[in-house]
Amino acid sequence: MTAALTLTDVHKRFGREREVLAGVSMRIEAGERVALLGESGVGKSTVLNLAAGLERPDAGEVHVGGRAVHALADSDAAQLRRRDIGFVFQAFHLLAHLSLWQNVAVPLLLNGVELPAARARACTLLGELGLGDRWQALPRELSGGEQQRVALARALVHRPRLVLADEPTGNLDPRTAGATLSLLRQQVDASGAALLLVTHSEQAAAIAHRRLLLTPRGIEATG
């Protein structure tokens, strides 16, 4: 079976002196939830950017669903992100002037889905996340936890192959974070997507099937 994500002997340097990743390799299967842990500055977010094709490795290979992301033209990498990848960030990055359903529908519209179908899918998913009666609200009318639920819906609405989450509960209190993580796990499992979760939080890492520790020496399995 083709893996959702593979990194093979990936190197990445910023400037002459700073090699952030030195021979990093990992494999994440479809439907697998993996937490990537490590100290600040070790390159966790760089791994996410490489997986998404937002940055290119200096050496090594990156594949998403069998496609060689490291070798794609910028336009093809953007198309792959729109179709096959969902993003969840610590800062919710919702569009303030759009309603909740419009925020969620953005990936569908970018993929050519007609507006009525996109709205129906967005509202259905908002309903599954407990926001079905708020579909016309604006982001500023929601709490932080509610905004992150909208961000989850946006990340999953187009049924991506891979979900990349960068400290998705970093701005939430522990109780709200726990509820959000439960929803993330449920929705990822329901969609069959793989999840790569970058976090410092033991609470967040607990939803993973596996934990990987990124160090200057590479990646180590921790459980």
Image (cartoon, grey):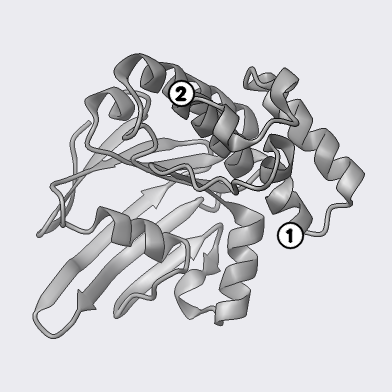
| Residue displayed at 73% across by 21% down | 132
Mark 2: which secondary structure? helix
Could you say which is closer to the camera, residue 202 or residue 134? 134
Q: Residue 124: x, y in percent?
A: 77, 27
Q: Quadrant of residue 172?
A: top left
Q: Quadrant of residue 188?
A: top right
Q: Residue 9: x, y in percent?
A: 27, 68
Left or right side of 200 for 149:
right
- Residue extending farthest bottom: 16
Amino acid at dot 1: Leu
Could you say which is closer to the camera, residue 166 or residue 215? 166
Identify the residue under disc 1. Answer: 110
Amino acid at dot 2: Thr
Identify the residue under disc 2. Answer: 180
| Residue displayed at 63% across by 33% down | 191
| Residue displayed at 47% across by 62% down | 52
Q: Quadrant of residue 16?
A: bottom left
Sequence-wise first label, 1 or 2: 1
